[in-house]
Image (spheres, grey):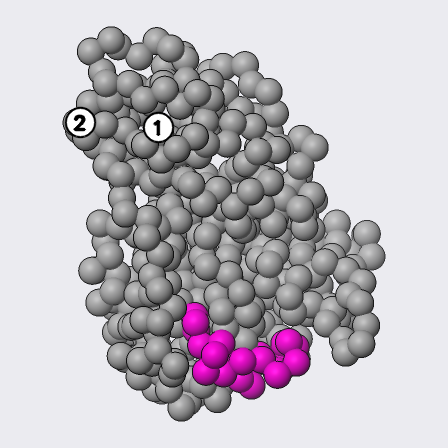
Amino acid sequence: MSHAFMSPPNAARFALSNATVPAVTLSDFQATSAEGLVKADIVVADGLVKAILAPGTAPVEYAKVDMRDGMVWPTFADMHTHLDKGHIWERRSNPDGSFMGALDAVRSDREANWSADDVRKRMEFSLRSAYAHGTGLIRTHLDSLAPQHRISFEVFTSVREAWKDRIALQAVALFPLDNMADEAFFADLLTVVRDAGGLMGGVTQMSPELDAQLDKLIRAAADNGLDIDLHVDETEDKEVLTLKAIAEAVLRNGFTGKVTAGHCCSLARQDADVARATIDLVAKAGISIVSLPMCNMYLQDRHPGRTPRWRGVTLLHELAAAGVATAVSSDNTRDPFYAYGDLDPVEVFREAVRILHLDHPLDTAARVVTTSPADILGRPDIGRIAVGHSADLVLFSARRWSEFLSRPQSDRVVLRKGKVIDRSLPDYRELDSVIGA
């Protein structure tokens, strides 16, 4: 199917006729489905979805684009990224692909190079890529060690304003919880995050102080009206399970804000009874979980001269079965934590299906990059197709799951407010001024 064939007319009112849609992304539309796919006509008027109808029934007065069963998705939600780290690989690569190698490389690069101009140029490059791929919502973690927290949040708030009509942006302060011991720093960080409308984050580590640290973080978040999004148990070490402590702290403090935990790799290393008890606590505490399958496979169980023995991802199926809100996301992009990637949720979804076995059946799998992350991030207006919502849609020539998951879908067409956008990706040469040729 050519681009011209899929492209809607230059009209305020048209219908995408005979489309195939992942049912889980539709609101208020009932139809029989085969592996979660339904047929529909999607009617667009003045930039909004006006109606979702049975296939072939769109009003005759609307210009029609016959999708010939091609898929239509909503724009994507990418809920765990690192826009401040992105695209530094050529400047500071990971010498051995290890987690410690990544930590050291990013620390060195941050201290040497992360000026406001540097962060802004790389952040903008990432957003242009994500926009071209069809993303409508991104949450980014920002390294928040003094004085970087002020630089990065200032850049972020400026970029968020510039991009508000293209991608909705959220930011999380990422820092070692040990740093809360510096009262002046922590007070300043809270002010910066609160003023920026961000979230508190952090990296949890097993220590005698963990419970007290979590209590302090949660109380501070509650006092300032902030939600929490943590980096949790990004290790193969079975002895590390801070996720349990986080759930207990949320319950102990009666925290009513939203809490998200990312990675949770070591949960998959636990004995069945320990894993089950932890998942039950997570469900009771209302914690959301996001898995980062591409980055987790890249870093976890990497040992010189040895083939990895496990996939590095968390127990997503078991968590979802327990009623925990779950999603997947991009994580790092071309930096020492993940050498590859382009903030393309189609790639993330395709790899997640393979790595996490989200298939057989695929009936609700599409939720993990659409409705689920959008709901977790408090934006139910994004990541779903609903009457009255903006006609922010992604059109694919693929008609069935096998077609969709077997190619990168580079011929997709992205609509924003019913208009086709330019999907040209930025040239890496544009980064030469900050990364070096």
Mark 2 secondary-structure assignment: loop
Q: How many marks?
A: 2
Residue type for callout 1: Phe
Q: Residue drawn at (36%, 39%), measured in percent from left and top?
A: 413
Judging by the rendered image, the residue that carries numbered circle 2 is 11
Classify 10 Å Cα crowding around label 2: few (below 14), some (14-19), many (20 and above). some
Determine which residue is flagged by label 1: 5
Q: Position of residue 193 (x, y in %)?
A: 32, 70
SS class of the residue under badge 1?
helix
User: Nearest the camera: 103 or 288?
Assistant: 103
Residue 162 shows in this picture: yes
Q: CA distance from mark 2 to mark 1?
A: 15 Å
Q: Residue at point 23% right, 37% down?
A: 419
Left of 159 or right of it: where is 135?
Answer: right
Instruction: Confirm whether the magenta stretch covers residue 89.
Output: yes
Instruction: Classify 261 as above or below 324.
Output: below
Q: The C terminus is located in which quarter?
A: bottom left
334 on left or right of 120:
right
**Where does the image place residue 271, in percent across and percent down from the top left?**
82, 57
Amino acid type for the residue under numbered disc 2: Ala
Residue 405 appears at what percent x and percent y?
Answer: 58, 39
On screen, residue 329 above or below 300: above
Q: Which residues are magenta?
A: 85-106
Residue 193 in view in this figure: no
Of circles 2 and 1, the one toward us is 1
Q: Is residue 150 left or right of residue 247?
A: left
Q: Residue at horizontal 67%, vertical 55%?
A: 314
